[in-house]
Image (spheres, rainbow, N blue to C red):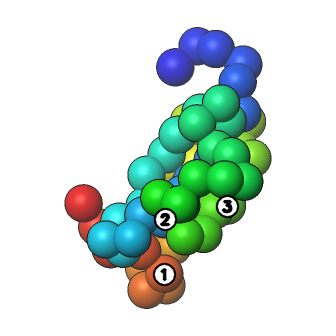
Amino acid sequence: MSNTQALYIVKRPTGNCEIVPSNQVGDDNPEIIEQWGPFTSEEEAIARRIGLIRAGKCQPV
């Protein structure tokens, strides 16, 4: 991902967490239970998502 858009980790109702660009995150989205971010790089977001899975906050996909 070479764009400079901020990334967020969002938790879906199924318990899975996904990394999405900031334009897909909104206050009125019922599909997002919890969110973390913003992250400036995809690597940082992936590392944080792994940490959330290990902490039991997210289910692996």
- Disc 2, SS: strand
* Residue annotated with mark 1: 57
- Viewer can see residue 59: yes
* Residue annotated with mark 3: 36
Q: Measure the C-alpha gap from mark 1 to mark 3.
A: 11 Å
Q: Amino acid at mark 3?
A: Trp
* Residue annotated with mark 2: 11
16 on left or right of 44: left
Comparing 55 with 58, the one in front is 58
Q: Which circle's residue, 1 or 3, is located before the other in the chain?
A: 3
- Disc 3, SS: strand
Residue found at x 66% / y 53%: 28
Classify 10 Å Cα crowding around label 3: few (below 14), some (14-19), many (20 and above). Answer: some
Q: Are marks 2 and 3 in contact (CB under 8 Å)?
A: no
Q: Are marks 1 and 2 in contact (CB under 8 Å)?
A: yes
Residue found at x 70% / y 24%: 5
